Amino acid sequence: MTQNNTQPTPFSRPMSSGRKFAIPAAAKKAFRPAQAGEKPTEQKNSSVKTGANINRGYRPRQPFRQNLQTAPKLKIIPLGGLEEIGRNMTLFEYNNDIVIVDMGLQFPDENMPGIDYVIPDISYLKGREKDIRGVIITHGHMDHIGAIPHLMPKLGNPPIYTAPLTAAIIKKRQDDYKDDPSLNIRIINKTDRLQLGIFSVEFFHVNHNIPDGFGIVLHTPVGNIFHTGDFKFDFSPIADKPADIGRIARLASQGALLLMSDSTDAMVPGHSLSENKIQDSMDEIFKKEGGRIIAATFSSLISRIQELITLAERHGRKVAFDGYSMKTNVEIARRLKYINTKRDTIIKIEQVKNYDDKNILIICTGAQGEGRAVLMRIINNEHRSIKIKPNDTIIFSSSVIPGNERTIQSLKDSIYRRGAKVIHNKMMDVHAGGHAQVEDLKMMMSLVKPKFFLPIHGNYYMLKLHGEIAQSVGIDKKNILIPENGRIIELDRNSIKATNKKAPTDYIMVDGLGVGDVGHIVLRDRQMMSKDGMFTIIVIINSKTGQVTQEPDIISRGFIYMKESRALLNETRLRVKKIIAAKTKEKPINWTYVRNNLRDLIGDFLYQKTQRRPMVLPVIIEV
């Protein structure tokens, strides 16, 4: 009998249930098993600051040897990113060693008037700053980097490990925080291995809608943890390489205790759309349309911006960028060669008028209908250089963030009223999401073959659906945990469980220069004012007699139109004087008590008359 010495690839290893998952042909082609006796290629360490504990090249890590009877459990503490979209930040803690993955912000919802964004609560780390061995940032989107300027000084400025494009975006944003200490950023390659305290960390390249995204493998005393970051599989990406399927499989061959995987598109069937498909669709638009093309997209979609530039050059169009974040990110990406253009392709927005409409592409911000973004200013005739023309074509090359649907529909209506044309992803493939859909999620599970599974990044129903997908490919239901923000998860080689302990995860709101100074009470007041308005009563009182010296003055904002409500205002003034007369009989006068009664009684009176409850603000001036 002839002995077969061929070792099975990771693709042939079944899940725990014995099922096999079909790997696309393109993925198999991308995988090349390590050859017998092959040694890793050593690379120079010139891109990393001196002292960074980074080893170049791939080397299998020896397993930890611990007494399972006495070894502590690994703690996983999500401070954000679960039961919500954004605010991604996760802690991994073993004894006195802590590693942080991502440090993002969350954009406010409609119940947060005036709030710029929300960041994670790091109260759990107070007094533990010296235990933080490093912060790993998986990619350059704001929901993964946005909290860095606010949190790093409070955490003692530990080193940040990330890829070159992400590092450049973080540094550029830090220019707005000149009073803060310089960040300690250390650039890594995706073949590096870090030693961060007890933890050893390796990386694998994934696709997203911004280059330089990666997942991580955290080698811990209890086992290996795979954290995908935001990811999808794209075998023909633009301005990027395909996800490193082979490396994922080789790292997984060392064993995978836990997989933590992106859940954002867990409800979308099929495979993620390739950026190449988007380019083909938009090529048809460039061929067909004879007027200006205005493409609105996220400034962080570097691959999409490169697609548009390539198409503009192919069809003889000049490219003008507008929007602060757009111009900033394009400048960074061009410097790092993530965006490539011909020498004379890009022009200033003010030069657009010097060219025929058929030779112009404008790439700008504002696809979400933001009030002061470029596209909104163009449509409202508030832009200095650009106004909508009847032969313009406006491409919305982005997904709609939940809550923005009505604003974007209004934007489209305004465009059509001006005679221009709108193209969006419901009409043509002009946008591909950056997150894995159902079949890609299955593929990641098939590559990693984890014992335990923890869905991350998404609202609760997304996490729940992702858990069901894991069951469908053979992961035991008892080994799947649906996590929640703040809940301390304990992991060892034989079990994963959510403890009854919870870290604080309050919303820390950023409003202008204030960080955390807007709490629930202030937010409630803003909500009340935005709902029923404000009603201010100014009363001048003789401090000795307690008598009102002149007619109370009333100011109303967002409650009633004062010129048409004179009867209500006159009745209110009479009641103000009666309340003050009744409450100032006893001496000495307690003015705080008088103000509180005035607020409550006038509030009840206004509700009886209008069925609305404005914020009543009594101001008493003693003379």
Image: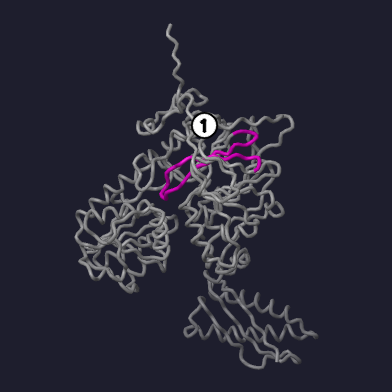
Report the number of discs: 1
User: Depth check: 166 or 365 in front?
Assistant: 166
In the image as oriented, which residue stretches furthest toward the right? 587
State the image coordinates of residue 350 (x, y, percent, origin top left): 30, 71
- Which quadrant would the N terminus be assigned to in this image? top left
Q: Is residue 474 inside the magenta stretch?
A: no
Q: Residue at x 41, y 42 (%)?
A: 268
User: Depth check: 420 or 26 in front?
Assistant: 26
User: Depth check: 569 or 428 in front?
Assistant: 428
* Quarter holding residue 550: bottom right
Question: In this rendering, does residue 349 appear at all?
Answer: yes
Coloring scheme used: one colour
Q: Is residue 618 above or below residue 437?
A: below
Tag 1: residue type? Ala
* Quarter holding residue 622: bottom right
Q: Residue at x 65, y 59 (%)?
A: 154
* Quarter holding residue 260: top right
In the image as oriented, which residue stretches furthest toward the top? 1
Residue stretch in magenta = 197-223
State the image coordinates of residue 383 (x, y, percent, origin top left): 34, 72
Is residue 7 found left or right of 360 in the rendered image?
right
Dot 1 surroundings within 10 Å: few (below 14), some, or many (20 or more)?
A: many
Q: Is residue 75 above or below residue 412?
A: above
Q: Is residue 353 above or below residue 190?
A: below
- Which quadrant would the C terminus be assigned to in this image? bottom right
State the image coordinates of residue 402 (x, y, percent, origin top left): 44, 55
Question: In this rendering, does residue 260 appear at all?
Answer: no
Secondary structure found at label 1 = helix
In the image as oriented, which residue stretches furthest toward the bottom? 549
Is residue 236 found left or right of 178 in the rendered image?
left
In the picture of the structure, the residue carrying the numbered disc 1 is: 252
State the image coordinates of residue 282 (x, y, percent, origin top left): 27, 51
